[in-house]
Image (spheres, rainbow, N blue to C red):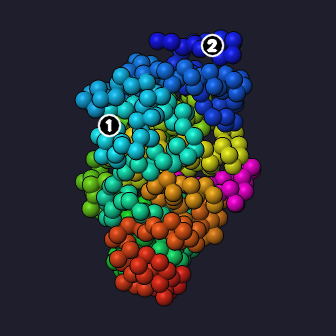
Amino acid sequence: MRLGVTLRGKTYRFIEVKEVLAKANAPRSGDYLAGVAAGDAAERVAARAVLAGLTLGELREHPVVPYERDALTRLCEDSLDERAFRTVAHLSVGQFREWILDDATTPEQLRAVAPGLLPEMAAAVCKLMSNLDLMVAGRKCEVVVRANSTLGLPRRLSSRLQPNHPADELVGILCSTREGLSYGCGDAVIGVNPATDSVASTVEILKALDDLLRRNRIPTQHCVLSHVTVQMQALEQGCPMDLVFQSLAGTEQANKAFGVSIPLLDEALAMVRERGTARGPNRMYFETGQGTGFSCGAHHGADQVTLEARCYGLARRYEPFLVNTVVGFIGPEYLEDGAQITRAGLEDHFMGKLLGLPMGCDACYTYHSSMSQDELEALEVLLASAGCCYLMSLPLGDDVMLNYQSTSFHEVSALRRLLGCRPTPEFEAWAAELGILEHGLPGPRFADPEVVR
């Protein structure tokens, strides 16, 4: 295995594959903060040259966290589809990139190879792609899942309706929900981040949402984003719950900081399959974001893109209905500005889809990041063009509980009109029946919150 290269008379040598992966990354503040980034642009080019020559088989032999030290590494390795892996094991990362982008390579072929890929392979090829490459490749990776509705079909753009309230007041949550539904939003899920992470608030919010959906016969899913253990207690009490949610990180140690483990997630999946209210078969919802491993000191010297890919390696064990990278939420310590947030959103979407997941994105930024509203809207267009399964949708794009900027109800509608996309077929039929939409476009009762009672 060759871990060195000479460029313009200067020789660059790297100690291990993990260093090559880290230094091949596009610039981002988190990698600099962790001390794993390339020293300059020339070293970054050298790392990419070395990475392009490594085979997928060699990447398999060198995970960024050793097999014996990390349960997530063991999970990904032990569950790898050997037959699918053998079809690409001989390819270099550079050749794998060319194969993915080749017009002759079909979505069906990409789906077939996904179970044979490890997260480090998805991260590696991602680092050799431009933003446009990531869009083209992400669009080719089609992943279709079903709960109460069908997500991920071509030419569809769904949204998570996020009616958060700073005091968990049901009146405010339901008012925001009705407004969002009137804009044709919420077909991916109606998901509330609770201000109070308690069983009582989780049950109260879910029951209110369930009543609204049943009363209006709305074909979507509901979820409260409390800790998975809180949701499991709510399920034990007989609370209606379509999807079980949990945030994920890319190492065993980082997930322990979140209070989760693989056995706990296994238990949650079994419970929602037995007691959940969605028709299924996909019943789980995960959120991720570059920088989570860094924020709790559990990155093991790996870079944040590769750690993010490892989140997806864990997520696919549970055949989720939704996976969402909250791309600019963790803060400028990890993604400093609009260019870094944009690149990360496209990377995450592509890596998740390549590994077989129904990827969405919370295109967002915190108020101390260097990103403008124009840059945020441009990212939304790029993601939707790349085939992103869903985006967020909030009143005016401003989350009054979490205090960050995301996608608004009217922006989701504008993106659908701009790109010729529609919501899930089940939701579109419901919205057409009420006059919210007509042929996928705004109908006579569009943006009328009184249409949902």
Residue 139 x/y as whole percent: 44, 51
Above or below, 41 against 397 in this view is above
Q: Position of residue 233 (x, y in %)?
A: 38, 53
Q: Which mark is residue 6?
A: 2
Up-down: is 378 above or below 81? below
| Quadrant of the snapshot with the C terminus | bottom left
Seen in the image, is 213 located left or right of residue 34?
A: left
Magenta span has 286?
A: no
Please give the residue where the numbered disc 1 appears in the rendered image. Answer: 113
Q: Position of residue 400 (x, y in %)?
A: 65, 64
Residue under the image location 47 percent in, 20 percent down: 54
Q: Nearer the viewer, residue 214 or 238?
A: 214
Q: Amino acid at mark 1?
A: Val
Can residue 451 be seen from the camera position used here? Answer: yes
Closer to the N terminus: mark 2 or mark 1? 2
Magenta segment, which residues?
Answer: 359-376
Secondary structure at badge 1 equals helix
- Residue 175 lies in what quarter of the image? bottom right
- Amino acid type shown at disc 2: Thr
Q: Is residue 449 left or right of residue 235?
A: right
Let me know if residue 364 is in the magenta part.
yes
> Which of 266 and 53 lies nearest the eye of the viewer?
53
Where, by quadrant of the figure, is residue 362 drawn?
bottom right
For image coordinates 65% across by 31% down, the residue present is 31
